[in-house]
Amino acid sequence: MNCDSNSLQTHEGAGRLVTRKVGSHSFADRRIVDLEVSLAGNTRRVFEALSVPEYMEVWMSIPGHSGCGASAVREDDGFVFEHSCSNGTVTKVSGTYLVCLRRKLVYSWKVTGMLNVHDSLVDIRLCGDFERSILRLRHFQLQSDEESAWHKDLWATSLSRLNRLLGGGIDHPRPHGLRGRQRRPSTYGAQIFSGRD
């Protein structure tokens, strides 16, 4: 991640996904998708949701196509995700894992079907944040502004769905960077620490 870049923190949709988009300054980097999200789940749960095909079917979302069918399978050292619409169009996303560890996933990315884009790479890092996890996604080697915009939409929508799958639809998610549980003033321990009787 580029620590010197400007960032924007947003809250998206009913799932209340906390998202920090990291901007980049160089022309060559403008086609890189950089996202950082706080997800409701420890790193083990998030890793399983990212790497088990049955979970991928639920959270991965092709931009502009809701309510269509999806299937995913493990294939050799990777996965194949198929999105089928009622009009017969099929979009296939395939990936081959280059690194597949609990806190680090790197895989090739290829989209075919209704949208054919160049092969690219996805790099996902997971950091534990108590009962939540920080997911840092970097999708690079995108060849055009259209490919970049399409993938930004895909990842923003998909990660929001992933957060809801992991139970992130709670009323008050913690903003990114706020560590630990928040003590409610009505609890006994909070009264002791606040000096009230």
Image: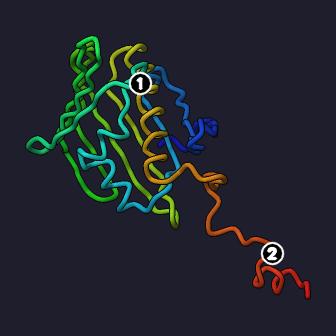
Q: Nearer the viewer, residue 194 or 31?
A: 194
Residue 180 is left or right of residue 117, and the answer is right
Picture coordinates of residue 122 (x, y %)? Answer: 31, 37
- For the residue marked with disc 1, what is the amino acid? Ser
Query: What residue is shown at x 50% (from left), y 43% (from top)?
Result: 36
> Crowding at label 2, few (<14), some or many (≥20) Cα neighbours within 10 Å?
few
Among the 4 quarters of the image, the one containing residue 139: top left
Element assignment for label 2: loop
Among the 4 quarters of the image, the one containing residue 73: top left
Dot 1 or dot 2, earlier in sequence: 1
| Residue furthest left as drawn | 76
- For the residue marked with disc 2, what is the amino acid? Ser
Residue 84 is left or right of residue 27, and the answer is left
Q: How many numbered marks does the figure carry?
A: 2
Residue 10 is left or right of residue 77, and the answer is right
Element assignment for label 1: loop
Picture coordinates of residue 85 (x, y %)? Answer: 29, 18
Query: What residue is shown at x 25% (from left), y 46% (from top)?
Result: 54
Among the 4 quarters of the image, the one containing residue 5: top right
> Crowding at label 1, few (<14), some or many (≥20) Cα neighbours within 10 Å?
few
**Is the C terminus in the top left, top right, bottom left or bottom right quadrant?**
bottom right
Above or below, 36 against 69 in this view is: below
Picture coordinates of residue 151 (x, y %)? Answer: 39, 25
Coloured how?
Answer: rainbow
Q: Name the residue tied to disc 2.
A: 186
Q: Name the residue tied to disc 1.
A: 66
Query: What residue is shown at x 42% (from left), y 35% (from top)?
Result: 158
Residue 23 is left or right of residue 51, and the answer is right
Query: What residue is shown at x 45% (from left), y 40% (from top)?
Result: 161
Q: Which mark is residue 13?
A: none
Decide: marks 1, 2 in contact (CB < 8 A)? no
